[in-house]
Image (spheres, rainbow, N blue to C red):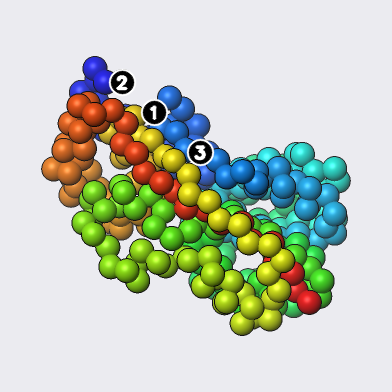
Amino acid sequence: MGTRTFEALVAEAVAAPTEGWDFSWFEGRATEERPSWGYAASLAGRLGGARAALDVQTGGGEVLDFALARASRTPAYTAATEGWPPNVEKAAALLGLRGVQVVASDEDAPLPFADGAFDLVSSRHPVRPHWDEIARVLKAGGTYFAQHVGPSSVFELVEFFLGPQPDEVRTARAPERERADAEAAGLEVVDLRAERLRVEFHDIGAVVHFLRKVVWMVPGFTVEAHEPRLRALHGRILREGPFVAYSSRHLFDVRKP
């Protein structure tokens, strides 16, 4: 990769599709440690005991599809919501094969389901957890099981492009703050775990693809607007090796009393 030009690496990254949560494009170009709890496999175990399940902000449906494929039995009814139209289309095609109802629903909209409709609600990396809505659609005794993005995740990269961020931005998504919000919605936090995990970007194409795919990291990111910083980072990777950052993840196991 190191012998390829800046222009070639960037052009390849810009041409790559960004819908869904398939990260196979990064193979050999970027690495990220995985949390010790193995979310997708753990979700499979939860699905095996659920009668009605909902996956919120499902992306392209890849994580739910993986979990359903490995569940000992599948719920009698499974639904998923997604707000970004290209992902809705991808999730409907993938999850429809498993009988999942995929509903187009904006991330900030109320969940389009009846009160107490589900005994399991899941989500991997929601933009924001809407605790009141999660509590509303869960049955009494039901579970919210999810992996969230934590505070200051990959901020080494964010701040390379945007400069130092204020404390209120750095501490957003703090797990203890989310715990308090969950409890305020009447939910009981059974387990909450947090980890920081090493991320390496091996070439500038991986950085471009990541920032195009995870659009909230550097809002409004384009190659044209950020070309000087991209070129500076390309030079740094060639001189010093992979750019290292740290992602932040936490696991919620939450119960509705």
* Residue beneath the point at 69% across and 76% down: 187
The residue under label 3 is which amino acid type? Glu
Pointer 3 residue: 33
Give how far across and how far down residue 130 sits, in percent.
57, 72
- N-terminal of the pair, mark 1 or mark 2, is 2
- N-terminal of the pair, mark 2 or mark 3, is 2
* Residue beneath the point at 46% across and 27% down: 27
Task: Say above or below: 150 vs 96.
Answer: below
Look at the numbered discs 1 and 2 and tell me whether their residues touch, using CB distance below 8 Å: yes
Q: Quadrant of residue 31?
A: top left
Give how far across and how far down residue 136 sits, in percent.
70, 77
Task: Say above or below: 68 vs 201.
Answer: below
Q: Which mark is residue 29?
A: 1
Q: CA distance from mark 3 to mark 1?
A: 14 Å
Assign a secondary structure to mark 3. Answer: loop
Front-most of residues 60 and 198: 198
Pointer 2 residue: 1
